[in-house]
Image: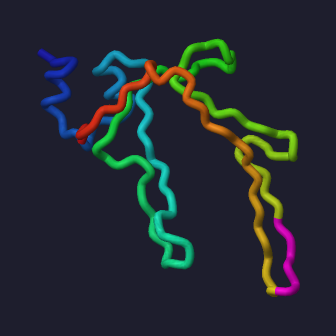
C-alpha cells in the first residue's frame, strides 16, 4: 500500500524531494527554493560568491498571487520606471576612451517592502 504525507517524506532522501513534491506533501500551493547568490567579498578583494539564504533557513509565508495592491501578502517589490528603468533591468553600454574600455551600466530601480510581517514565519535550523 503506497504511503503519503509525512510517512512518505521520511522514506525518501531529502535531496531527492522536488519543490513540487514537497508542496504536495505539505498541501501548499507552491514551494519556492532560494537559489540566488551574491558577491560577498569586500571591494577590491578577490571575488567570492555566497548564497543569499543559508541552507539552514526556510520561510513559510503568504505571497501575492495578483498585481492588486490590496491583496494581503508578506511583501512586494515596487518598480520605478520614471528614469527609463524596465522590469529585469535596463542595460546600457558605451565606450570610455580615457580607460580604453567599455562601460556596462544596468538600471534596475526597485524597492522591496514588507507589508504584513505577520504573514511570514522564518524557520531556523531547517536543514
Q: Depth check: give the residue in front, 115 or 63.
A: 115
Q: How many numbered dots are placed on residues in this image?
A: 0
At a point 35% along the width and 32% down the height, the residue shown is 122
For residue 69, which quarter of the picture?
top right
Is residue 44 shown above or below 113?
A: below
Task: Give the image location of residue 39, x and y in percent.
Answer: 51, 63
Does residue 73 appear left or right of residue 82 in this picture? left
Task: Give the image location of residue 53, x and y in percent.
Answer: 40, 47
Task: Give the image location of residue 59, x and y in percent.
Answer: 38, 31
What is the magenta range? 93-98
Is residue 90 shown above or below 119?
A: below
Asked if the stretch drawn in magenta spans residue 15, the answer is no
Q: Depth check: give the residue in front, 69 or 7.
A: 69
At a point 57% along the width and 21% down the height, the residue shown is 64
Is residue 104 shown above or below 15?
A: below
Q: Depth check: give the residue in front, 109 or 100.
A: 109
At a point 14% along the width and 30% down the height, the residue shown is 10
At a point 73% along the width and 36% down the height, the residue shown is 79
Does residue 108 appear left or right of residue 59 in this picture? right
Is residue 1 shown above or below 36?
A: above
Q: Main secondary structure of the magenta part?
A: strand
Amino acid at each position: 500500500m503506497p504511503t503519503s504525507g509525512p510517512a512518505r517524506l521520511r522514506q525518501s532522501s531529502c535531496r531527492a524531494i522536488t519543490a513540487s513534491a514537497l508542496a504536495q506533501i505539505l498541501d501548499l500551493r507552491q514551494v519556492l527554493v532560494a537559489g540566488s547568490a551574491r558577491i560577498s567579498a569586500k571591494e577590491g578583494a578577490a571575488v567570492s560568491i555566497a548564497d543569499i539564504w543559508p541552507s539552514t533557513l526556510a520561510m513559510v509565508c503568504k505571497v501575492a498571487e495578483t498585481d492588486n495592491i490590496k491583496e494581503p501578502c508578506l511583501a512586494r517589490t515596487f518598480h520605478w520606471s520614471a528614469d527609463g528603468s524596465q522590469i529585469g533591468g535596463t542595460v546600457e553600454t558605451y565606450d570610455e576612451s580615457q580607460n580604453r574600455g567599455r562601460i556596462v551600466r544596468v538600471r534596475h530601480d526597485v524597492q522591496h517592502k514588507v507589508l504584513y510581517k505577520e504573514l511570514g514565519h522564518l524557520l531556523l535550523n531547517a536543514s
